[in-house]
Amino acid sequence: MKVFLDTNVWLSAIVFPGLCAELLLALHEGGHDVLTSELVRRETHEVLQRKFARHAQAVLRFDLLWARATGVTDVDEPADDADARLVAAAEQAGAELFVTGDQRVLGWDPRGGMRVVGPREAWGVVTPRL
């Protein structure tokens, strides 16, 4: 399954133990195709350096995990809405899931069959039920 993680999911996975970190691990271990883009990398670096400077290893940990993901081409428009650009890039790359914690984005209904879901719903989709 192709899964695009929003910047806020990457940040949660890198900085805080819990669901997003487990989701990222499950995606990699389950052989899913984690999609990302240069915009996600730039946004994540900026937030890690600005808000989480005390987490000295966070940027390094992110870079190592991000490098394992499949890079997709960023979309340039709309220039004033990074969220819309990320969703469009995910759609263009054939993602089946766009995972975000952003309530505004969770309400979107993209074209083409891609689902916009929160981390908990994504967890239910990508991990086998016991």
Image (cartoon, rainbow, N blue to C red):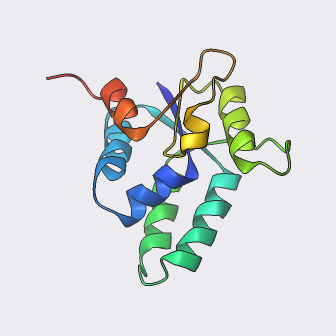
Task: Report the residue at 38% width, 41% height from top.
Answer: 28
Compare residues 63 and 22 and report the one nearer the observer: 22
Rendered view: 42 above or below 103: below
Q: Position of residue 73 (x, y in %)?
A: 74, 41
- Location of the C terminus by quadrant is top left
Residue at the limit of the structure toward the left, as seen here: 130
Rendered view: 45 above or below 91: below
113 left or right of 117 in image: right
Q: Position of residue 116 (x, y in %)?
A: 54, 29
| Quarter occupied by residue 85 | top right
Q: Position of residue 76 (x, y in %)?
A: 85, 45
40 left or right of 12 in image: right
64 left or right of 44 in image: left
Rendered view: 73 above or below 108: below
Rendered view: 4 above or below 2: below
Residue at the limit of the structure toward the top, as seen here: 113
Task: Report the residue at 86% width, 42% height from top.
Answer: 77
50 left or right of 32 in image: right
Q: Position of residue 57 (x, y in %)?
A: 41, 76
Q: Number of numbered discs present?
A: 0
Compare residues 39 and 72 and report the one nearer the observer: 39
| Quarter occupied by residue 123 | top left
